[in-house]
């Protein structure tokens, strides 16, 4: 600021001055004006440097465009910066300042610098209750011209110190620190990893959030229960859902006769496996359950009657059951195609080797999505959103009677991904960097949104989409229709690299070869004085020469007389 004010101090009445304050984009723009006092006030009111990235070239282009409107030929750009090397991207694209525009770089950076920075932190974004201990990894790096070898890294969860570790980099430039943390309580937990040991605290913290969700309550309605596991329709499905202590699911199994509206309301997702003898009241209860936000997975088997199924569930089913297709022992179908972008199948992007000898031919609903197909082009997995809920229809069974899918390694993750998708929406991004533009309510359905930034100040929205630009590291707290959501914002790692570039590097890259150096008023005055004095010095030499001739003539005359 002082350097900018000094430049203004050299201006005189009638001079035009513009001002650009920038990071990776221009944040303060004052077009050319002769009101130097107003520009001086604008500079004085700048509070402090921001946390954003640095980009020189776009803002130099803007400065050049502003100067195009000047009525003076003597035009110049003054760049006041610490000339961070990370900011000179696009410098070699060949762009130059306009002919006649001079450039002066004023370096306000320090020659020596030292810094310890957290370049990356890896933490879980979402967990379920009873999850085991979680690992949190923090990468520490030393930057700057002076090497710092030692520091301390600490982990805090919800404002409470969990652990601290002494770091000795030795001859290394970085090190990874491993923390162990437990997240026992349901809800959103706020985390902070902090590094100490340097004098630059701006980039010493890394913020994150962890959501702990309750276990998903799964109700298995077993349409062909048996004491013999190999005849039990729900045996393999049950193993996949709850075979380990760390399972994200809480499984309850009933037979169709026990199904009621009250039982449905106590669960997050219902799995109907080969259920074909439901009453009309039970079917109505399932329809209402889905319409009101429930999730339903259907795997029809040989006990299902297509006419009864289509009549009872036609309003919510992803497809109409047409006919049962049972192949001979030596014949089978395989999964030939699937939607690799779908949240269920994206993590399972591999070949499906399961063989299917029995399946239901289905006609998908016009509002449904076919997620998987057999090699005869018939749908194998269909999804449909109904009301506030969703339904998934699998064309075959979930046991070994019609296929060998339960014996495949993909079966367990397939079941888990399906149940998660039906109950939990896809995880939304909650971690951002300074300069990112994002919405605090990405669904677009909220009626009330309020938020405070990392400093606790209220955020005023200038749009109906609740889109903001992250400007300060820390945690943003938003209340969306009464639900509290927290977003973590961190500094850009590249901005913690204090490597600098020479002013001459930028000068050589952008100065136009047709530009003659513009001299200051002091230099111009000195040149004018010199031009005025030059004839005077010439007359002095002429006068001296005349005097010398007179003296010589007198000497010669005296000698001749004698």
Image (spheres, helix red, strand yellow):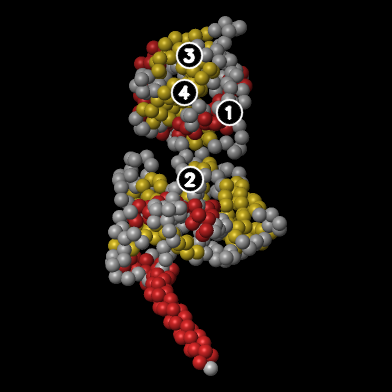
Residue 93 circle label = 2
Question: Going 41% across and 63% down the picture, which residue do you hit?
Answer: 518
Residue 412 circle label = 1
Frontmost residue, 395 versus 353: 353
Can you see residue 227? no
Left/right placement of residue 327 relative to residue 47 reads right
What separation in Å lies between label 2 and label 3 (alpha carbons)?
51 Å
Frontmost residue, 559 versus 467: 559
The reply to whether the C-beta atoms of the residues labelled 3 and 4 are less than 8 Å apart is no
The reply to whether the C-beta atoms of the residues labelled 1 and 2 are less than 8 Å apart is no
Mark 4: give few (<14), some (14-19) or many (20+) Cα within 10 Å.
many
Residue designated by label 3: 377
Up-down: is 135 above or below 238?
Answer: below
Question: Going 36% across and 16% down the picture, which residue do you hit?
Answer: 311
Residue designated by label 4: 371
Dot 3 or dot 4: first in sequence order is 4
| Disc 4 versus disc 2: nearer the observer | 2
In which quadrant will I find the N terminus? bottom left
Mark 3: give few (<14), some (14-19) or many (20+) Cα within 10 Å.
few
What separation in Å lies between label 3 and label 4 (alpha carbons)?
12 Å
Frontmost residue, 239 versus 495: 495
Image location of residue 380, percent across then percent down? 48, 18
Q: Secondary structure at mark 3?
A: loop
């Amino acid at each position: 600021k002082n350097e900018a004010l000094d430049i203004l101090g050299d201006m005189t009445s009638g001079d035009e001055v513009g001002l650009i304050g920038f990071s990776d984009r221009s944040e303060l723009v004052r077009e050319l004006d002769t009101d130097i006092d107003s520009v001086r006030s604008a500079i004085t009111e700048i509070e402090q440097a921001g946390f954003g990235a640095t980009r020189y070239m776009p803002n130099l282009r803007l400065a050049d465009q502003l100067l195009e409107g000047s009525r003076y030929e003597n035009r110049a750009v003054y760049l006041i910066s610490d000339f961070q090397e990370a900011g000179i991207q696009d410098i070699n694209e060949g762009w130059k300042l306009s002919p006649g525009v001079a450039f002066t770089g004023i370096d306000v950076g320090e020659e020596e610098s030292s810094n310890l920075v957290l370049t990356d932190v890896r933490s879980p974004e979402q967990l379920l209750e009873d999850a085991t201990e979680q690992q949190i990894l923090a990468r520490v790096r030393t930057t700057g011209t002076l090497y710092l070898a030692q520091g301390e890294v600490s982990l805090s969860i919800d404002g409470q110190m969990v652990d601290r570790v002494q770091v000795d980099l030795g001859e290394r430039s970085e090190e990874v620190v491993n923390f162990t943390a437990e997240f026992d309580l349901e809800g959103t937990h706020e985390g902070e990893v902090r590094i100490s040991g340097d004098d630059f605290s701006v980039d010493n913290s890394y913020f994150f959030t962890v959501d702990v969700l309750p276990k998903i309550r799964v109700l298995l309605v077993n349409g062909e229960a048996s004491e013999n596991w190999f005849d039990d329709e729900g045996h393999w499905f049950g193993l996949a859902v709850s075979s380990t202590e760390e399972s994200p699911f809480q499984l309850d199994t009933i037979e169709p006769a026990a199904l009621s509206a009250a039982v449905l309301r106590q669960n997050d997702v219902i799995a109907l496996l080969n259920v074909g003898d439901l009453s009309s009241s039970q079917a109505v209860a399932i329809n209402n359950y889905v319409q009101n936000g429930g999730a339903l997975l259907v795997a029809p088997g040989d006990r299902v009657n297509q006419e009864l199924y289509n009549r009872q569930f036609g309003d919510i089913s992803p497809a109409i059951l047409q006919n049962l297709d049972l192949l001979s022992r030596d014949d089978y179908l395989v999964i030939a195609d699937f939607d690799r972008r779908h949240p269920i199948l994206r993590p399972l992007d591999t070949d499906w080797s399961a063989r299917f000898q029995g399946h239901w031919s289905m006609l998908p609903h016009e509002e449904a999505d076919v997620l998987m197909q057999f090699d005869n082009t018939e749908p194998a997995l269909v999804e449909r959103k109904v009301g506030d809920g969703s339904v998934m229809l699998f064309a075959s069974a979930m046991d070994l009677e019609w296929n060998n899918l339960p014996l495949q390694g993909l079966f367990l993750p397939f079941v888990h991904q399906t149940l998660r998708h039906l109950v939990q929406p896809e995880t939304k991004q909650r971690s951002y960097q300074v300069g990112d533009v994002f919405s605090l309510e990405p669904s677009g359905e909220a009626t009330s949104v309020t938020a405070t930034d990392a400093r606790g100040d209220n955020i005023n929205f200038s749009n109906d989409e609740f889109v903001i630009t992250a400007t300060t590291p820390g945690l943003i707290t938003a209340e969306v229709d009464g639900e509290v959501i927290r977003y973590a914002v961190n500094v850009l790692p590249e901005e913690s690299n204090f490597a600098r570039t020479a002013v001459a590097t930028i000068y050589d890259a952008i100065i136009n070869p047709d530009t003659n150096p513009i001299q200051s008023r002091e230099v111009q005055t000195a040149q004018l004085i010199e031009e005025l004095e030059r004839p005077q010095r010439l007359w002095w030499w002429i006068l001296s020469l005349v005097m010398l001739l007179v003296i010589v003539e007198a000497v010669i005359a005296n000698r001749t007389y004698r």
